[in-house]
Image: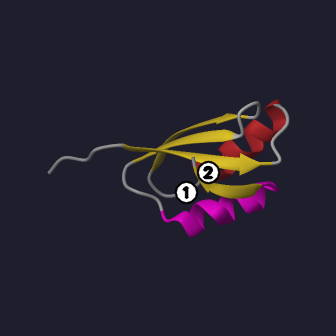
Amino acid sequence: MTFENVTTVYKVSGMTCGHCESAVSEELSGLDGVTAVKAVAASGEVTVTSAALLDEEAVRSAVDEAGYELVGPA
């Protein structure tokens, strides 16, 4: 059985600095199966690598918990 990583780019509104990037990354890193997160405030994009496709509501909830808004997949 092989596992392939899935990489998804999401648009997140409200990020303006490194602290914002860290807050979003920390929340998303806590989701099951997430192996890497890279948030870029300048573009409003968050790249998430996971073992399987993530549930968008779980991603939305994590971004909301960090204090930002998930716009949707980029």
Which of the two residues, 26 or 74, is positioned nearer the viewer here?
Answer: 74
Q: Give the range drawn in magenta.
A: 55-68
Instruction: State the residue position of label 2.
Output: 28
Q: Residues within 10 Å of mark 2 (few under 14, many from 20)?
A: many
Element under disc 1:
loop
- Residue 56, compared with residue 28, is above or below; it is below
Q: Is 51 displayed left or right of 18 in the figure?
A: left
Q: Distance between the residues labelled 1 and 2?
A: 6 Å
The residue located at (69%, 57%) in the rendering is: 70
Q: Where is residue 49 in the image (x, y as percent from the top left)?
A: 46, 42
Which of the two residues, 60 or 27, is positioned nearer the viewer here?
Answer: 60
Element under disc 2:
helix
Q: Where is residue 71 in the image (x, y as percent from the top left)?
A: 68, 56
Which of the two residues, 25 or 56, is positioned nearer the viewer here?
Answer: 56
Tell me which amino acid carries mark 2: Leu
Q: Where is residue 4 in the image (x, y as percent from the top left)?
A: 28, 44
Confirm whether the magenta stretch covers residue 66. Answer: yes
The residue located at (75%, 61%) in the rendering is: 64
Tell me which amino acid carries mark 1: Leu
Q: Identify the main secondary structure in magenta.
A: helix
Q: Do the residues labelled 1 and 2 touch (CB within 8 Å)?
A: yes
> Among all residues in the image, which is located at the extreme bottom?
57
Q: Where is residue 55 in the image (x, y as percent from the top left)?
A: 49, 65
Count of residue discs: 2
Q: In which quarter of the image is residue 45?
A: top right
Q: Residues within 10 Å of mark 1 (few under 14, many from 20)?
A: some
Which of the two residues, 3 or 45, is positioned nearer the viewer here?
Answer: 45
Q: Residue 31 carries which label?
A: 1
- Residue 59, compared with residue 40, is above or below; it is below
The residue located at (62%, 41%) in the rendering is: 46
Q: Is 64 displayed left or right of 25 in the figure?
A: right
